[in-house]
């Protein structure tokens, strides 16, 4: 019998249910088959445009024993859950969810807007992941070079999960339901991940995307929805992404 470590079979009915409130009316409909294995026949993707923020750092997991640059956002893989008491920067200054566009599921089509570049050939600088430089702005020295390398591999590094953005709303994967806040909305760089070619979870440098002109929607931890401009400064963006790094953000800075 096949092993099912993520409970895909027992959760298939609810996971594959399309919830209209998780889909942006401005985006395309997720009319394609799922990449995930639900131990049953192929099913249409349920779709998801709204991602829990992992913060302004590359780490997706709080469980890795060697990590010193642990996730600084509200959501992440494993570890202790975050409460309001843990949001030292204030709920009005911290992102809870960001907007993304849906992928098509067609791996062979190169698309800077929806591709997640990952797999063999895209590796993080040595030691970054297990240091304070995993979080921004401490890692601002290595990030531009890594994003440029990622962009250069857009047409060549085509892992199995390259076009699975927003496939389902129930899987705790970075690129399906979780995302970092490392790039401004609709960045010229692709979504970049240090995961293997047969995985979607990995250290990453993602950013919001939308079909709206000029920016993308974000939900702050106080429950308010704001429109984050494409032109937002990186320091402001990273400050909004982190929950407890002590940044002070002007109300008119984004």
Image (cartoon, helix red, strand yellow):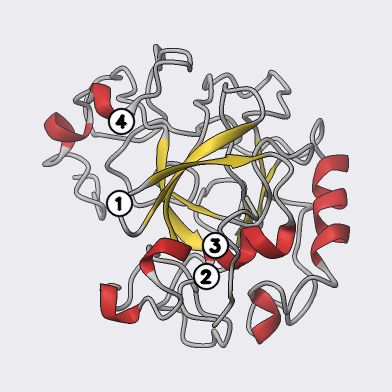
Asked if one can make out residue 58 in the rendered structure from this viewpoint, the answer is: no
- Pick the residue in front: 245 or 82: 245
Mark 3 nearby-residue class (10 Å; few <14, some 14–19, many ≥20): many
77 lies left or right of 8: right
Instruction: Kindly report the distance in space between the C-alpha atoms of the residues bearing marks 1 and 2.
Output: 16 Å
**In what quadrant of the picture does the N terminus appear?**
top left
Q: Where does label 4 land, which residue?
A: 22
Instruction: Kindly report the distance in space between the C-alpha atoms of the residues bearing marks 4 and 1.
Output: 16 Å
Which residue occupies 76% across, 54% down?
122
Mark 2 lies on a secondary structure that is: loop
Which residue occupies 73% across, 82% down?
127
Whether the residues at callouts 4 and 2 have beta carbons within 8 Å, the answer is no
Label disc, if present, on residue 65 of the rendered structure: none
Give percent across and percent down for residue 223: 30, 51
Q: Nearer the viewer, mark 1 or mark 2?
A: 1
Which quadrant holds residue 233? Answer: bottom right
Which residue occupies 32% across, 45% down?
171
Label disc, if present, on residue 223 of the rendered structure: 1
- Pick the residue in front: 94 or 61: 94
Q: Nearer the viewer, mark 4 or mark 3?
A: 3
* Earlier-in-chain disc, 1 versus 2: 1
- Pick the residue in front: 88 or 27: 88
Mark 3 lies on a secondary structure that is: helix
Q: Where does label 2 land, which residue?
A: 242
* Earlier-in-chain disc, 4 versus 1: 4
């Amino acid at each position: 019998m096949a092993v099912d470590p993520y409970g895909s079979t027992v959760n298939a009915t609810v996971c594959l249910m399309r919830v209209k409130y998780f889909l942006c009316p401005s985006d395309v409909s997720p009319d394609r088959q799922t990449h995930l294995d639900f131990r049953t026949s192929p099913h249409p993707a349920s779709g998801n445009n709204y991602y829990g923020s992992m913060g302004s750092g590359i780490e997706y997991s709080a469980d890795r024993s060697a990590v010193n640059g642990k996730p600084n956002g509200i959501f992440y893989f494993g570890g202790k859950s975050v409460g309001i008491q843990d949001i030292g920067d204030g709920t009005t200054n911290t992102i809870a969810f960001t907007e993304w566009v849906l992928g098509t599921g067609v791996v062979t089509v190169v698309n800077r807007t929806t591709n997640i570049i990952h797999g063999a050939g895209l590796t993080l600088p040595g030691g970054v992941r297990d240091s304070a430089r995993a979080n921004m702005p401490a890692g601002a020295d290595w990030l531009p070079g890594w994003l440029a390398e990622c962009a250069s591999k857009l047409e060549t590094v085509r892992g199995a999960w390259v076009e699975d953005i927003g496939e389902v709303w129930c899987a705790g994967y970075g690129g399906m339901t979780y995302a970092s806040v490392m790039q401004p909305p609709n960045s010229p760089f692709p979504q970049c991940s240090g995961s293997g070619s047969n995985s979607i979870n990995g250290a990453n440098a993602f950013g919001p995307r939308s079909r709206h002109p000029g920016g993308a929607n974000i939900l702050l931890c106080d429950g308010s929805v704001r429109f984050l401009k494409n032109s937002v400064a990186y320091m402001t963006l990273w400050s909004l992404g982190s929950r407890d790094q002590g940044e002070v953000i002007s109300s008119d800075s984004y």
